[in-house]
Image (spheres, rainbow, N blue to C red):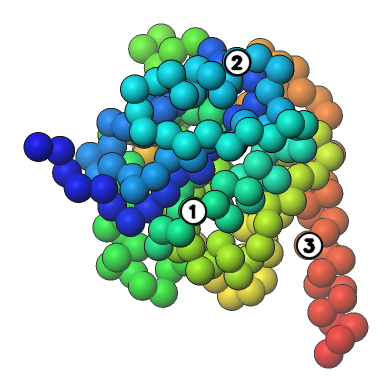
Amino acid sequence: MGQSPADYAVVIPAWNAADTIEETLRSVAAQSVPPAEIVVVDDGSTDDTPGVAESVRVPVRVIRRPMQEGPGAATTLGVRSVRTTFVAFLDADDLWLPDKMERQLSHLAALPDVAGVFGHWQSFDGGPEMGLRPPLAGWSRTTLVVRREVADAVGPMVDLPARVGDMIDWIQRAREQGHVFSLLPDTVAYRRVRPGSLSDARTNLDRNRGYLAAARNALLRRQSAKADE
């Protein structure tokens, strides 16, 4: 018999991910500690992402949004739709390693003062079997597991210019509230790099606008806090 589901939900924002969503969902289904729920939030895809997600033999709930608003808005909607103690996230073209959630849930159980935990990831082109790039710290949606009450306290993931930087902005806001995050040294996920995707800096020269907006927002919040002192 398989292991009983743990008290966590997986939220997967997806846009035009029909070519990758099945493999992504199967990496969730292969977890040594399975989730209580998997939610795919389709962000106004123009391909058959919702249909492909629903056709995979994995228990999944698909929320369809008629228009694309961004991964931050899609992630926020997914979080608001679940009621588990922990929430994990995964981009619709990335993959989890089978023991990812087991490692991270054990870490959070041992450290109750830690709000959430990230891990390392390795990027790949085409498929992992074709070769992986060296591990990097994955301060990203794909590696994050967070306590539900922390997600609620920090609030929505806000989409920024070029639809990047929402996670940087969210992490900074969480830290400003005093929440502490850990980074596991383990590789817990694989990050797919596709030409033209947000993961491919070579073809997305506009992506830095989102990161600059995240930095500017943090500066404005600090200035506002000082003015209120």
Q: Bin the neighbour count of mark 1 within 10 Å (Cα to Cα): few under 14, some 14-19, many 20 and up.
A: some
Asked if the residue under mark 3 is in contact with the one under mark 2, i.e. CB atoms within 8 Å, the reply is no
Residue under circle 1?
A: 82
- The correct choice, above or below, for 226 with respect to 195 in the image is below
Residue under circle 3?
A: 218
Is 3 in front, or is 100? 3
Give the alpha-carbon distance from disc 1 to disc 2, as whole Å.
24 Å
Is 143 in front, or is 12? 12
- Label 3 sits on a secondary structure element that is helix
Image coordinates of residue 227 in percent, x first then y, are 90, 83
Could you tell which of marks 1 and 3 lies nearer the N-terminus? 1
Q: Is residue 119 left or right of residue 62?
A: left
Image coordinates of residue 70 in percent, x first then y, are 73, 37
Residue at (50%, 17%) from the top-left corner? 52
Residue at (63%, 74%) from the top-left corner? 177
Q: Residue 20 has which mark? A: none
Specify whether residue 34 is in view: yes
Q: What quarter of the picture does the N terminus occupy? A: top left
Could you tell which of marks 2 and 3 lies nearer the N-terminus? 2
Q: Bin the neighbour count of mark 2 within 10 Å (Cα to Cα): few under 14, some 14-19, many 20 and up.
A: some
- Label 2 sits on a secondary structure element that is loop
Q: Bin the neighbour count of mark 3 within 10 Å (Cα to Cα): few under 14, some 14-19, many 20 and up.
A: some
Q: Is residue 32 left or right of residue 170?
A: left
Residue under circle 2?
A: 48
- Label 1 sits on a secondary structure element that is loop
Between circles 2 and 3, the one closer to the viewer is 2
